[in-house]
Image (tube, coloured by chain):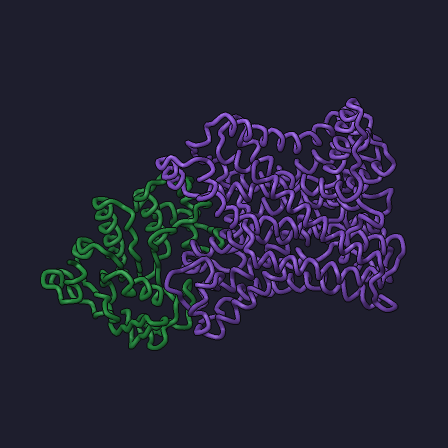
Chain colours: A purple, B green
Amino acid sequence: MADRAQPLNLAVWAGGLAAGVILALTLGTITAVLTRAEGAFALAAGDLAAIRFTVTQAVLSAVLSCALAVPVARALARRRFVGRAVLVTLMGAPFILPVIVAVLGLVMVFGRAGWVSTALGTLGLPPMNIYGLHGVVLAHVFFNLPLATRLILQGWLAIPAERFRLAATLDMAPRDIARQLEWPMLRATLPGAFMVIFLICTTSFAVALALGGGPRATTVELAIYQAFRFDFDLSRAAFLALIQLAISAVAALLALWVAVPQATGGGLDRTVERWDAARLGLRVLDGASIMLAGLFLLLPLLAIALRGLPEIATLPAGVWAAAWRSVWVAGLSVLVTLALALSMTLAITRLGAAQWGFATPTPPASICPKKKPEREGFPTWPVAIRRRCAVARGIEAVGYLAMAASPLVIGTGLFLIVFPFADPVTLALPVTALVNGVMALPFALRALVPAAQEVEARFGPLADSLGLTGWHRLRRLTLPRLRRPLGFAAALAGALSMGDLGVIALFADPEAGTLPLLLYRLMGSYRMDQAAGVALVLLALSLAVFWVLDRGGRVDADH
Amino acid sequence: MLTIEGVVIEQGDFRLTADLSVPSGGQVAVMGPSGAGKSTLLAVLAGFVAPQAGRILWNGTDMAPLRPGQRPITMIFQDNNLFPHLSVFDNVALGLRPSGRLGGAEAAQVRSALARVGLAGFEARKPATLSGGQQSRAALARMLVQDRPLVVLDEPFAALGPALRGEMVDLVAGLCRDRGATLLMVTHDPGDALRLGGDLCVVAEGQVSPPMPARALLADPPETLKSYLG
């Protein structure tokens, strides 16, 4: 009775194949690098410094992002004002903002010749220096303060309104409410937010490339790039790659251990009603928090817009050629992400589907237990079912492996594999598209798997009883129902690939690179006006790619 | 004739046994307390769950090797009977062909089924724009084009008000009678069972009782049914 329909098996095979491709790309490429490596592995003094810097900057970035996010989230939680919804939405935007664009904006505001330094100069103070540790941390806080704010805001809004009402009837002062309601929530929320940001910052490459460097401010990822690009020292690159993998793995395990919160994105349009917060002092404090956070996030973009707009008309033709290359690289990445994510999602869903002839008390989204309490009776289930769940979990875990893998290592490995057969430079763009597509996979899976399991739980029995299987089921049921998450996954993959400055920096021909690479080179030669123009084009293209693809999933979608 | 022969369903602590038969064209209500296994019994009939022991036969043929879509059964669920992204016409057409590509007279067949349940002119509408009763009617139209000899309903009209539910029970009973289809319907309401006018199966205490005339059974209910009816 189980294993009834052939097409089910086809989906499972396709998902397994996709998982195999990812394993080959992540672990296989490390092997490729290792086999080419010669000489003994030993940590040079610089490598130790790189490890120390990677951890230090990640800890600092995470601590600062979380600490600064608390007053901002608190203000957003208890104040209603015009533009609040826009601000909360904007807090989600840095995720798709090209890193190099943000870095340029930060340089224009906080750099040696930036707005802040100019202001300091009029007061007779020395200008700021944005390069080095504090520059890297500043950029990471720019990207992660909004993320931390959203996560903590979620925590605030998750406190039941009745508790605040109870506090009001007891005439509690803000201090009492903080102690009774808000501290417990923060104690539960902050470790997770810290770990997410720490994990993100340990794999930082583009920020370190643009603002770090030198013996005192090199991350492991940047060291891999330098070992490969400048010294062509493969054994060192491979060894550093293993170190990076270890750091990411430890960070990922820690993140699993503290139960990372999920930024759901929805439901943040509410505010908490507070009867204690009407005091003038608190209102000024909240207003200032929101204002400062808003300025910190918007000024860099404003700087780019002001300086870049006049440049757009006079940008050289090379820019538009690079823009075109960026667009098709992004398009290719979208296809890679969707193909991998969809086949893995279908396999995971199929393997966990209740229609394997084994019924659970209530039909859940997936019969494979996720949480501990659900696992109680699990060991007594039939072996075949438990094995299916293990395979499903395995496929999903492989999908998330891309989180811990270094795109630079994958790029280096592919370079070595391709090297004997073709000129890697000519394959730079397709390889970039492939790696970027794999990097977006965890986010795509997170959007698609729960949605597909929902479709299966709601409509699986009806489809089964109608004999809707295989291709027809995919075309008439699954794909139409998954339009929104598919659009969202495509939008993320496209925007992330569009703004990526990673693999492309490894071995692209500088004259035929993508927009982010061109922008990085313009910044390197201090052509800031032109850089601002290019940054504006890149920013507009990234947002446009995101908007078009995400919108494509929403228009006319019936729910 | 539907024959349920020594069927045993076990899931952890849960255990249900059934041994009964329903003659062709019979109309049987299935009642019993929540959690007694009514829906599980239907899931076994439809092929979603395999029984641990026993056989289920339709006109003497064992259904075990058949997938849900291959069984001579039309199933109507409590909810989610229509795909929200497909029009009413396409939803009904799925009963004829999973591909949705209809040939020759089949489109006319879909239209006449819709007209038969009172939904003429609703072809292009999406399910979300229909009322609860109209959605039930659309599912019944699909049942008509599927034209399978056994119709199984799992509390199909639970979301409708009493008057509308009575109307729908009459409609589905009439449609089945017209084509000689056998009908099995899980319900919570003794009124539905009386309205159906056929037999009644009681699912309680791990057993499915053989069908007995509903009117007589409800007039003088056995202990298991009495405690359920209250």
User: Is residue B60 visible from the viewing direction of this image?
Assistant: yes
Q: Nearer the viewer, residue B92 or A58?
A: A58
Residue at far left of view:
B220
Tell me: A269 left or right of A247.
left
User: Is residue B123 visible from the viewing direction of this image?
Assistant: no
Compared to residue A220, the image places residue A90 above or below, namely above
Quarter containing the N terminus of chain A: bottom left
Q: Residue at x 54, y 27 (%)?
A: A284
Compared to residue A489, the image places residue B18 above or below, namely below
Q: Position of residue A520 (x, y in %)?
A: 81, 40
Q: Nearer the viewer, residue A510 or A430?
A: A510
Q: Quadrant of residue A49?
A: bottom right
Q: Nearer the viewer, residue A181 or A212?
A: A181
Q: Quadrant of residue A89?
A: top right
Residue at far right of view:
A231
Tell me: A310 left or right of A146.
right
Q: Residue at x 41, y 43 (%)?
A: A160
Quarter containing the C terminus of chain A: top left
Q: Position of residue B164 (x, y in %)?
A: 24, 44
Q: Position of residue A270 (x, y in %)?
A: 46, 36
Compared to residue A474, the image places residue A126 above or below, namely above
Q: Residue at x 26, y 56 (%)?
A: B176
Tell me: A221 left or right of A379.
right
Q: Position of residue A321 (x, y in %)?
A: 81, 37
